[in-house]
Image (cartoon, rainbow, N blue to C red):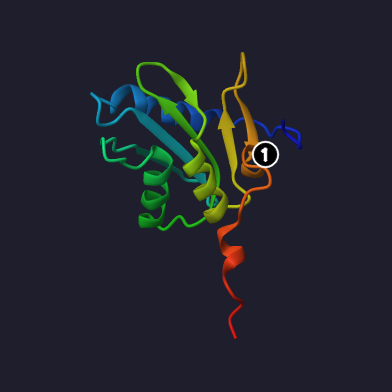
Amino acid sequence: MTTAHPHPVDDELVRAATHIARTRCHGDNHTVAAAARARDGRIITAMNAYHFTGGPCAELVLIGTAAAQGAYVLDTIVAVGDRDRGILPPCGRCRQVLLDYFPGIDVIVAGGDRPRTLSITDLLPEGYVWADHQLDPA
C-alpha cells in the first residue's frame, strides 16, 4: 500500500532500459537492464551480471557505474527484463541498498496497464536506514 501519490513516469528512462534489455541482454549472464536519471539530468544504464553464486542485480551495477561516471545522486531508477518481460520491481536487497544510498530516489514499477513511479520509502516502508547506526562524528 502506498502512502504518497505516484510521481510522473520518466518515459525516457523506461525506453533507455528497454533498449539495453533488448539489444545487450544475451543469454543467462545478463537478463535485466536498468536506467537511472542522475541529478544532473544524465541517463546512466547498466545490466545485471547473473551468476549462480549471487551476482549483482542491474540496479546495484548501475550504482557503481553511475559513481564511476561522477554521478553520485540518482533521482529515478527503473529495471526492465530481457525477452520483453517489461518493467521489473527491485528485489528486497536492491530496495534496501537504494534506500541507503538514495533515500529520496523514485522507482518506476509496473502498475497494471501502465507504469507508475513511487518513492523508495513507499516500496520499503518502515525500512531500516543503515546510516542510522553510525555515530555522529566527534
Residue at image position (52%, 55%) is 101
Q: Where is residue 96 in the image (x, y as percent from the top left)?
A: 53, 47
Q: Which residue is outermost to the top?
A: 113
Q: For mark 1, give the secondary structure.
A: helix
Number of numbered tags placed on the structure image: 1
10 Å crowding of disc 1: few (<14), some (14-19), many (20+): some
Image height of 21 relative to 58, above or below? above
Identified by mark 1, the residue type is Asp
Please provide percent x and percent y for residue 65. 36, 49
Residue ID at (50%, 35%): 90
Quarter placement of the N terminus: top right
Q: Viewer-proximal residue, 118 or 68?
A: 118
Q: Give the side of residue 94 with respect to residue 47, left or right.
A: right
Residue 136, quarter of the rendered image: bottom right
**Residue 120 position in % (x across, y down):** 61, 42
Residue drawn at point x = 45 percent, y = 55 percent:
71
- In the figure, 108 relative to 96: above or below? above
Q: Where is residue 78 in the image (x, y as percent from the top left)?
A: 50, 34
Q: Quick one: quadrant of the C terminus?
A: bottom right
Residue under numbered circle 1 = 122
Which of 32 and 132 lies nearest the eye of the viewer?
132
- 128 displayed left or right of 41: right
Picture residue at 57% right of the left edge, 70% below the top = 134
